[in-house]
Amino acid sequence: MKVTIAYIEEPPFGWTEADGTATGTDIELADAVLRTIGVTRIEHRLTS
């Protein structure tokens, strides 16, 4: 199953690292919950 997460640039909750990787507390929490329920592909999309 694939899930796409939209996030905004709002440290410490979510931001984009220099290498393009999405990170932050909200993103890490969402990733952990989604993996727990069996999601195997998680995509992050920056939104405004």
Image (cartoon, rainbow, N blue to C red):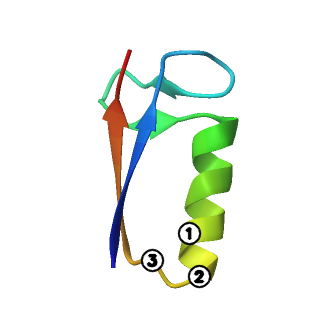
Q: Nearer the viewer, residue 44 or 19?
A: 44
- Check disc 2: other Cα within 10 Å, few if <14, some if 14-19, many if 20+: few
Image quarter of residue 34: bottom right
Q: Which residue is mark 1?
A: 34
- The C terminus sits in image quarter: top left
Going by the numbered disc 1, the residue's amino acid type is: Leu
Left or right of 31 on screen, residue 3: left
Question: Where does residue 21 sit, x and y in percent of width and height?
Answer: 37, 37
- Residue 37, which numbered label? 2
Percent of width and height locating residue 15: 50, 23
Question: Are dots 3 and 2 in contact, CB under 8 Å?
Answer: yes
Describe residue 27's horizontal placement relative to residue 8 as left or right: right
Residue drawn at x 41%, y 37% is 6
Location of mark 3 (residue):
39
The image quarter in which residue 27 lies: top right
Three-letter amino acid code at the position of disc 3: Val
- Relative vertical location of residue 18 with respect to residue 5 in this rendering, above or below: above
Residue at image point 63% right, 79% down: 36
Q: Is residue 35 left or right of residue 5?
A: right
**Disc 2 to disc 1: CB gap under 8 Å:** yes
Which secondary structure lies at badge 3? loop
Marks 3 and 1: in contact by CB < 8 Å? yes
| Amino acid type, mark 2 | Ile
